[in-house]
Amino acid sequence: MSLNVGFLIITVLKIAGLLAWVYGLLWGLGQRTWAAKLVTVVGAFAVIQLAISLPFGSVTLFSDFDSGLLFQACTMAMVALGLNLIYGFNGQFSLGQWGFYGIGAYAAADITYRWTNDDARGLLVVGIGVILIGLVILVVHRFLSQYTGVPVMSAFTLYLFGSIAAGAVAVALGGAGHAALAPLFGTKAAPGILQSPVVIQLVFFLAVLLAGAVAAEISFLFGLPVLSLGSDYFGIATLGFTIVVNTLMINSDTILPFPEMKGGRGMIGIPKLTNWFWAFAFLLAVIVVMRNMIHSSTGRAIMSVREDETAAKVMGIDIANNKLLAFVVGSLFAGVGGGVYAHFIGFLSPGTFDFLVGFNPLIIVVFGGLGSMTGTITASFGWIFFLEGLLRVILGQLGTEAPTWRFVLYPIALLLLMLLRPKGLLGTVEWGFLKAPWVPMRSRAEANTPPQA
Amino acid sequence: MVFSAGNSPAPTLQIEGLTKRFGGLRAVGNFDLTVQPGELAGLIGPNGAGKTTVFNMISGLYVPSAGDIRFQGISTIGMEPFEVTRLGIGRTFQNIRLFPSLSVLDNVRIAYHTHAGYRMTDAILRTATFTQRERELTERAQDFLAIFNLDRIQNEQASSLPYGEQRRVEIARALASSPRLLLLDEPAAGMNPAEIVTLMELIHFIRDRFDLTILLIEHQMRVVMGICEYITVMDFGEVIARGTPKEIQTNPKVIEAYLGKGAAHAA
């Protein structure tokens, strides 16, 4: 077989167009007026929506394959941005991101799967559980902040038992709530009000948010004791976390009481609710939240921990809290990404969340540049489209086994990049909206005259 | 400010019987020191005398093996370093510890973290509180930079600055955390004579301008003798002498510690 040159050119143009779209979006969001920002967001949404749905004769500009890659790129960008917050900005080498991504995916999938099968318990238990555990964490935190020098394991024990108790209450309340709501689901023949498309969209939206919250709360409980380890040891511990999560997924129908997840066979029948609107909205939310956080006092504190822990301590920054904050927010992004991913193909396999695949976001973050949000987003889109999309298609035309060569080309690309640009594609450079606001010089009128040499 | 240095009856810093052991090595033993409000005190001694260890214990980086440290009457034993800083003790490091890849302005703005005056949610939603407080905070940081003649390089990366400027950024950053007591660990290390003169003027200036109490470690005798009002001399982890610069210069024990046995007779 030979290469189809025309197809190749069109694909390369599409990828170039998409990267231009990413940079255009970031540039437009960086404009001063709200009107310009709004126009940018609506325009950016519309362009892709048209590319996906507007037919040119019998085809659309973006095929199903392309839009699939697009959704994958969006979720990957969320996961990788979260990891960049933890590793790139806070300096904590973590391999646990993939585990939180998996937790988010399974949590969100379980909520909507149960809902569409006339079971409100998924949403109710997770929703009530997240709120109660959040409250428990807040109360315990308030309680502990009265004392200094509480050993971290004692604090962890309090949080853990509080959370387990709250979880048990949530299961009981969820069961009761489900009994009350059951009639509203109606029957298969005559679906009730809770099965209307609007409610299902709302449930999906809540499911994704809750997926993020579940990941965040688990990361809080996990991170509290583990973050007190030094950086490398923390990396190993988080790798262990990803493996544990993966093992639990494989045995979700035997060890865990979730027969609908079907263990290693993979969870099928998840409603395919992710569309371009939701993928875009959640990606945008993650980008905006992360950017606003980084360019604030919180973000500067997070970066100071990466730069020099001792100096940060002496600047009055609570190192332990600060690391935990970055870890929790980063995991929240991963959970949201997982929720969006789960509803895109309607199938979740534990193999997707294997720790080896979990190196992908790490590679993307390093590739794009540690501490560069622009770099991470670019690398996520580039990674998916070049390596998963373009290469798979090109190599596929050369022979049926050829796409496997991707796994030789990935590492070579990474090697070359590290040799040519050791700080990643973009280093710490940001673009447009993601750039730190420019601070103008201040007149020296107010300042007293200092002694000068 | 809750504490006013002028009216507080308690000494700014009172250290009693401070001891630090690293395994079998006693780095600091039975160290006493009292610093009165507004004082410019010096801590000197040969290499390895335990001066920086004392600083690390005052700022909470090391936990003392024994003894007590009181800052304005409050014991800081068992406090985390960030709590000590929030109490009002700022410091610089012997081997400059800036946040290397951040800008000069951000280095100073980080010091405002604890009293930024807005929450993370304000920052994420970009509320009016955030916008206003962030502007105030930035302007205050810029004022500090102007005092230290660093305002023109506010957007430079900290690691790209020459040594002298890095020192000044570090002092500006320590001051921005609004301390009542400032610990300077060898501020003149690696400076040329002209820079040292400027530094001495600067230390006097900030003490008067910010109504500070300053405790400094220094090897350069011209600096110590030139600006310190009261000097404590350490050797092998213990205090061997205290007094005014004049008294210290003629103290035979000090001369012996610095120059060896017999030197006092020769002098």
Image (cartoon, coloured by chain):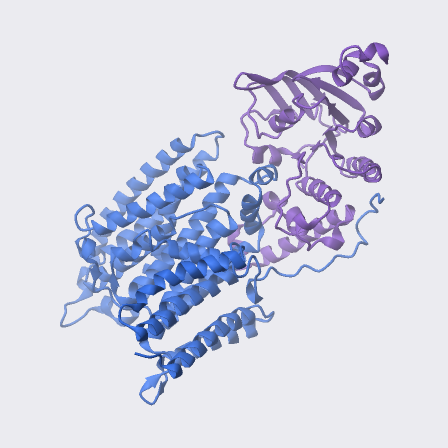
Chain colours: A blue, B purple
Q: Is residue A333 visible?
A: no
Q: Where is residue A7 shown, x and y percent of the image?
A: 38, 81
Q: Where is residue A77 shown, x and y percent of the image?
A: 43, 62
In the figure, is residue B109 to the left or right of A95? right
Residue A315 found in image quarter: top right
Q: Where is residue A436 shown, x and y percent of the image?
A: 60, 59
Q: Residue at x 63, y 45 (%)?
A: B112
* B4 over A177 or under it: above or below: above
* B208 over B156 or under it: above or below: above
Residue A121 found in image quarter: bottom left
In the figure, is residue A335 to the left or right of B118? left
Q: Residue at x 58, y 41 (%)?
A: A312
Q: Nearer the viewer, residue A350 or B135?
A: A350
Q: Quadrant of the N terminus of chain B?
A: top right
View extreme (front): residue: A1
Q: Is residue B90 visible?
A: yes
Q: Residue at x 46, y 37 (%)?
A: A230
* B206 over B131 or under it: above or below: above
Q: Where is residue A216 shown, x and y percent of the image?
A: 39, 50
Q: Quadrant of the C terminus of chain B?
A: top right
